[in-house]
Image (cartoon, grey):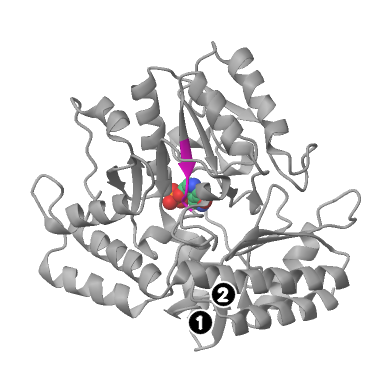
Amino acid sequence: SKEDVLAMRKQHLSPSLFLHFKKPVMIVEGKMQYLFDERGRRYLDAFAGIVTVSVGHCHPEVNKAIHAQNELLQHTTTIYLNPQVAEYAKELADRMPGNLKVVYFVNSGSEANDMAIMLARLHTRNWDVLCLRNAYHGMSIGTMGTCGHHTWKQPMPQGFGYHHALNPDPYHGAHGDNGPAYAADVADLISAATPGQVAAFIAETIQGVGGTVPLASGYLPAVYKMVRDAGGVCIADEVQTGFGRTGSHYWGFQRQGVVPDIVTMAKGIGNGLPLAAVVTTPEIAASMASRLHFNTYGGNPVCSAGGRAVLRVVDQEKRQEHCKEVGDHLISRLKALAAKHDIIGDVRGAGLMLGLEMVKDRKTKEPAKAELAAVMETMKDEGVLMGKGGLHGNVFRIKPPMCFSRADADYLVDVMDLAIGKL
Ligand code: PMP
């Protein structure tokens, strides 16, 4: 029973884990944008396993590809040739702009960002890494130091040489949507905090865990130039924003018209399979050419088959276009809801990567954290699973599987309206 599972979890799983709801939900089955509990109750999933199930729970194409490869070969490592991983690397590289042609496969977003930072340091022979306040890049020893909130890391030395720049946050920041104004802080960091040299600048193109914060317009072009002028490389963390989710573009960085030197991806890349990747240029990759670097599961054939199926489904089912269409509709309905309820301070994001910030007062923007938790719990009781995030836990994160329909969007807004009304 659910109670037994909870008891076993408490006794045998790490005490650092947390449950999303006060009254926990047990999920035993998933189908596209729906999840089912142990009693067969259906939920509309607006969080996709934390923005990971990209094309849909147990998508038939992905399942078919995984099963076929599973029957053939599960694992060998990359010490032998295998067509699956090589063809996957090519297909992924074909979707990248510029000279981003070399792929390293790993298993999680943290590993991908670890690897990206290592590559940047080896290539530039510099050490300092610039990141953003409010950032989230992982929980490994190497990435913890980049995170912008104390609860996203452990109280211990977190790697050295990380410097946090002013967040280019259009809703909370002092410069509104003026990206270059925030970028001036990066220039200060380069000259004051580093010896004028940087290894890398790393940023999500829409901050995810930090509460769906789209970077202010023109921020990345200004910062990329400063960082490159100082000898550093630019890393885009596309762990949440990639594969068409933002609707207008396949990659989040394209929203700002930049081409990074290193791109990291995870989550949506594998529709839930443990799969992640780092893509970079041959020049940067060459910094490791004479050195061994190995990852046992990286490029695993079953995960590669699943990842290739995700690429095909996003294209064939026109998921990017779909995210744009449904996302635009959802944003406009959420904005209409904000006109009705003062507690909604901001609606933001792009495609099916949306955020809704709840505030006690629109002027002071005081976080309405308890109110958000109550609304989230009511929505769950009404059959809609929402995500949350932000430094103060007062931002709804709406990031469903990309098959989420217009009718699903309408249902979500109606349920949210009802739940806010109950406050
Ligand atoms: N980068 C971003 C933007 C993320 O959202 C996450 C996970 N929330 C990570 C990196 C780390 O990924 P993982 O949990 O797979 O290590």
Numbered mark located on residue 25 in the image:
2
Residue at the image point whose x is 24% and y is 50% from the top: 297
Q: Are discs 2 and 1 less than 8 Å apart at CB?
A: yes
Asked whether 159 or 100 is in front, the reply is 100
Q: Is residue 406 above or below residue 176?
A: below
Q: How dense is the environment of label 2, judged by Cα within 10 Å: few (below 14), some, or many (20 and up)?
A: some
Residue at the image point whose x is 31% and y is 47% from the top: 106
Dominant SS type (magenta):
strand
Q: Is residue 389 above or below residue 280?
A: below
Q: Is residue 295 above or below residue 299?
A: above
Numbered mark located on residue 37 in the image:
1
Q: What is the secondary structure assignment of the residue under circle 2?
A: loop
Q: What is the secondary structure assignment of the residue under circle 1?
A: strand
Residue 219 image point, x, y percent: 63, 37
Q: Is residue 155 visible?
A: no
Which region is colored magenta?
Answer: 235-239
Left or right, residue 295 beside residue 161: left
Q: Is residue 88 above or below residue 293?
A: below
The answer as to whether callout 2 falls within 8 Å of ligand 1 is no
The residue most toward the left is 80
* Label 2, label 1: how far apart the Cα atoms are: 7 Å
Asked whether 129 or 15 is in front, the reply is 129
